[in-house]
Image (spheres, rainbow, N blue to C red):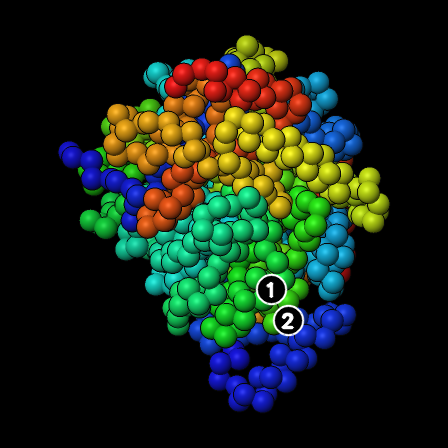
């Protein structure tokens, strides 16, 4: 920056800078070498920054970003109130770095039940700032420069930049749609991995595979057979599995969420990622966790203690109380883990009906609170632009939020750069919304359809 | 099939941590804990009330803006416009992070590269070294030296040697980490001292990472000066602050980085790829607390000032008690820690584990035999300086009166008991 400037100019610039009072413009001083670290290369773009801004600016009905617009359950918010008002004031101070004891104990108790094995809350569980930070710890702890990480497309967008930031190489393998022959609506179950194709992605450089089941954005719930296929390859190639199971409770139509860590040979090589935000409809609390063997979690602890160190105590205490309640109600009809998916299934079915009625073809999700719909009949409103640098569905979603006030997310956002144009007729809707919101969305769609048929 | 998976290179050797070790030891409730820096005093009631109010608002339980909740960054920009004397854009010049710890991490990951050198002043808050190493860079240490032949009554006696400091800068130096008020000595860097650092930063085109978490805790006769306000420094400085230290709520884990857009944007990229957003309800409550104190910033009732006054009297009491027990405290000009020379007590620990530094052994002995805990200074030093500081231990005095009363009993009885 100032290095290469002539002395008198440098002096002048310093003089200017020293006048107090008018510092409204920050003189952009460029260092003579790049100021940012190389690890940030190629990871500066983020779809949410853009789409959240669009939704905030234009949307009347927001089915875009994945968060509920209905309240978190009373028992949870009451727990927070109790903790803040009645709890010891020491709950406003640091707690145990790797997880507040009541919370890791509750998580260990729950996951012992779910996995059918003994768990030590101190070494088999760690609390993180949302599942997002859990994923970050996984990649930083386990992925070195040159390692390959298999990512199944479509994927929650952060996996790719996180792998890159860790110096790893993402290797993509797609879920491929096999539409039913009878013309019925597709289910997320119809999107499948090709076993041969999957096997071909494993090399001696493969460090890990990222599994997300139930899958965002499709809603796919991997079957035991599908998980078995992945597990076999992991064991054969000595590969780790980072299993993002944040939507573990949101499974519909009597389907079962199967944890890959419970399959033969998998516990020792799997890190399970979970989220209080998704479990308890409180995404803003940013409490997540990892569950896994000590020999993997010890490395995640090292990353955690050198990056954020502690998570907020109060949120952890309230979530612990939420889990304690759920443990007593486990399997009972009043359990939130039973009620929430029931409620969301109803909303799912309502949105499916609504989209179907206007000609958008939804893919029925087996899980999560997302569904993806084919918007082909509406393409005439948003003409294609040849050689555009933006995939079609991005343009469609932007047009839709600006002109119809309805926010959604383009499916291409969940694909790698190379594959962004593979599926450009799909957009993702979030249905974890009040009935009034879903109804308002329906009104917009109906009106839109009417405008099309009458024009 | 053998399991080949070990830790990644970036975390090699970074697994041990002084806090993990010492917080476990001091967790015993029979021990008077003056070790880890956490208040046992209550946060101000309005801070707790704001959080209680927020708990009842539905939408505050969902995601907020990734780089910082709008009402919080707005409040921070107002407070810091006053202290920095310049316009601060809440959206581009601020990043909210998980504690100041998270700000240090985002800054180092965002701006420090493999092969860079980063100057760290000893003794240092222990996380600076592993964070710099995790970024693939080399920590270059420079110690504070006691200027009166080792006889130190005040944190002001500990200074950098300007020639020694200048020698540490070279073309590979990417940044210097400054911590003022300083943990563990409590030193408040003077304008002149900051100018020496600033001159070097400008000369060598170096960044400055300024950890100012104790910015409000400055005692009579001292002034906290922000290095970012010195000429030529705003554009190359990241200033880090902490809700935990400002409001005595360390468990809220909210901090912030303030600086020019062209630097903050890189921290934002790190943030969006590490944890994306910080908890909403805590950010909203913090914003409300800041508005309350912003309005009375010129008033002595403002918590930023009242806490400082409260701590000054605790500091003075602590110092008196330690002197009474024959220990030599270094009176801090700021912060809530005090370092103490324990060599005068001549406690012979040569029989104990040879490999550990004296201060580690002393603290463990003190915990076991006196039921009083502190933190050894060696973890705050680079390898070459550990010997220089191993006669010092650190006490934390942001403690309620009953805790200090209990410490008083122990210290008064110190000499009555044999080792």
Q: Secondary structure at mark 2?
A: loop
Q: Residue furthest left?
A: B1
Query: Given this view, does label 1 or label 2 mark the residue nearer the observer?
Result: 1
Asked whether the viewer can see residue B409, the reply is yes
Asked whether the viewer can see residue A442, the reply is no
Label 2 marks a residue whose chain is: B
Residue drawn at point x = 76 percent, y = 54 percent:
B78
Left or right: A154 as drawn, with respect to A381:
left
- Nearer to us in this view, A373 or B105: B105
Residue drawn at point x = 55 percent, y = 20 percent:
B412
Say yes or no: labels 1 and 2 on the same chain. yes
Find disc 2 in the rendering and name its residue.
B231
| Percent x, y of residue B157 | 54, 51
Task: Tell whether label 2 touches label 1 (CB within 8 Å).
Answer: no
Above or below — where is B173 with respect to B150? below
Residue drawn at point x = 42 percent, y = 29 percent:
B345
Q: Quadrant of the C terminus of chain A?
A: bottom right
Among numbered discs 1 and 2, the one appearing first in the sequence: 1
Left or right: A193 as drawn, with respect to B366:
left
Q: Secondary structure at mark 1?
A: helix
For label 2, the crowd category at 10 Å Cα-Cα, with few meaning under 14, some 14 to 19 and many 20 or more, is some
- Nearer to us in this view, B154 or A445: B154
Which quadrant of the view contains residue B63? top right
- Nearer to us in this view, B388 or A428: B388
Residue drawn at point x = 57 percent, y = 51 percent:
B156
| Percent x, y of residue B297 | 80, 48
Which quadrant of the view contains residue B309? top right
Find disc 1 in the rendering and name its residue.
B192
| Percent x, y of residue A309 | 48, 38
For label 1, the crowd category at 10 Å Cα-Cα, with few meaning under 14, some 14 to 19 and many 20 or more, is few
Label 1 marks a residue whose chain is: B
| Percent x, y of residue A4 | 48, 84
């Amino acid at each position: 920056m100032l290095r290469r400037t002539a002395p008198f100019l440098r002096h002048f610039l310093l003089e200017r800078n020293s006048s107090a009072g008018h510092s409204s413009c920050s003189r952009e001083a460029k260092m003579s070498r790049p100021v940012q670290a190389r690890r940030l290369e190629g990871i500066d773009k983020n779809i949410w920054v853009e789409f959240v801004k669009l939704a905030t600016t234009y949307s009347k009905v927001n089915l875009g970003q994945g968060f509920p617009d209905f309240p978190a359950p009373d028992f949870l918010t009451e727990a927070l109130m109790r903790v803040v008002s009645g709890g010891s004031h020491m709950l406003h101070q640091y707690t145990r770095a790797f997880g507040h004891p009541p919370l890791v104990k509750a998580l260990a108790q729950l996951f012992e039940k779910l996995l059918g094995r003994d768990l030590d809350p101190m070494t088999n569980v760690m609390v993180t700032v949302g599942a997002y930070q859990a994923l970050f710890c996984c990649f930083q702890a386990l992925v070195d420069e040159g390692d390959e990480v298999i990512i199944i497309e479509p994927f929650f967008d952060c996996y790719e930049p996180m792998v890159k930031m860790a110096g790893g190489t993402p290797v993509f393998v797609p879920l491929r749609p096999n539409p039913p022959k009878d013309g019925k609506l597709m289910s997320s179950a119809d999107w499948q991995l090709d076993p041969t194709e999957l096997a071909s992605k494993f090399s001696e450089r493969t460090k890990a595979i990222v599994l997300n089941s139930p899958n965002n954005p499709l809603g796919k719930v991997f079957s035991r057979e599908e998980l078995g296929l992945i597990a076999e390859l992991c064991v054969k190639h000595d590969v780790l599995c980072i299993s993002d199971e944040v939507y573990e409770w949101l499974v519909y139509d009597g389907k079962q969420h199967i944890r890959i860590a419970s399959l033969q040979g998998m516990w020792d090589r799997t890190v399970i990622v979970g989220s209080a935000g998704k479990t308890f409809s409180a995404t803003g609390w940013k409490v997540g966790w990892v569950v896994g063997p000590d020999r993997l979690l010890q490395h995640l602890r090292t990353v955690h203690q050198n990056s954020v160190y502690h998570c907020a105590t109060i949120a952890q205490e309230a979530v612990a109380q939420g889990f304690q309640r759920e443990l007593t109600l486990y399997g009972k009809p009043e359990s939130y883990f039973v009620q929430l998916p029931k409620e969301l299934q109803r909303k799912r079915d309502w949105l499916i009906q609504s989209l179907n009625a206007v000609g958008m073809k939804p893919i029925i999700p087996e899980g999560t609170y997302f569904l993806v719909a084919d918007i082909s009949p509406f393409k005439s409103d948003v003409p294609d632009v040849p050689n555009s640098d933006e995939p079609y569905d991005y343009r469609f979603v932007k047009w839709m939020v600006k002109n119809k006030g309805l926010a959604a997310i383009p499916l291409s956002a969940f694909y790698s750069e190379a594959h962004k144009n593979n599926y450009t007729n799909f957009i993702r809707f979030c249905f974890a919304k009040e009935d009034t919101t879903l109804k308002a969305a329906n009104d917009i769609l109906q009106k839109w359809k009417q405008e099309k048929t009458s024009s | 099939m053998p399991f080949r998976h070990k830790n990644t290179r970036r975390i090699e050797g970074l697994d041990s941590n002084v806090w993990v070790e010492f917080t476990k030891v001091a967790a015993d409730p029979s021990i008077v804990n003056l070790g880890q820096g956490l208040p046992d005093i209550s946060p101000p009631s309005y801070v707790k009330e704001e959080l209680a109010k927020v708990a009842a608002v539905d939408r505050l339980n969902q995601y907020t803006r990734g780089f910082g909740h709008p009402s919080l960054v707005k409040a921070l920009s107002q407070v810091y416009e006053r202290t920095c004397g310049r316009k601060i854009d809440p959206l581009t010049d601020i990043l909210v992070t998980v504690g100041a710890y998270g700000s240090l991490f985002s800054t180092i990951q965002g701006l420090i590269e493999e092969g860079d050198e980063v100057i760290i002043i000893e003794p240092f808050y222990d996380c600076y070294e592993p964070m710099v190493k995790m970024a693939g860079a080399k920590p270059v240490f420079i110690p504070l030296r006691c200027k009166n032949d080792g006889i130190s009554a005040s944190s002001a006696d500990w200074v950098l040697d300007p020639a020694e400091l200048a020698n540490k800068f070279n073309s590979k130096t990417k940044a210097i980490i400054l911590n003022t008020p300083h943990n563990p000595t409590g030193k408040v860097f003077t304008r002149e001292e900051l100018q020496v650092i600033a001159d070097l930063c400008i000369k060598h085109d170096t960044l400055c990472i300024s950890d100012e978490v104790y910015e409000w805790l400055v005692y009579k006769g001292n002034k906290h000066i922000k290095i970012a306000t010195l000429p030529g420094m705003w554009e190359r400085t990241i200033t880090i602050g902490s809700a935990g230290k400002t409001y005595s709520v360390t468990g809220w884990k909210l901090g912030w980085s303030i600086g020019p857009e062209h630097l903050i944007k890189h921290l934002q990229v790190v943030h969006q790829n590490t944890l994306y957003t910080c908890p909403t309800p805590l950010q909203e409550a913090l914003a409300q607390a800041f508005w309350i104190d912003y309005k009375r910033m010129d008033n002595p009732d403002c918590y930023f000032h009242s806490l400082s006054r409260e701590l000054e009297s605790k500091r003075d009491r602590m110092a008196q008690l330690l002197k009474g027990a024959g220990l030599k405290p270094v009176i801090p000009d700021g912060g809530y820690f005090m370092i103490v020379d324990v060599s005068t007590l001549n406690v012979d620990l040569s029989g104990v584990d040879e490999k550990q530094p004296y201060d580690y052994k002393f603290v463990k002995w003190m915990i076991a035999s006196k039921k009083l805990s502190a933190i050894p200074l060696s973890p705050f030093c680079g390898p070459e300086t550990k010997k220089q500081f191993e006669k010092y231990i650190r006490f934390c005095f942001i403690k309620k009166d009953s805790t200090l009363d209990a410490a008083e009993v122990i210290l008064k009885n110190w000499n009555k008991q044999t080792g």
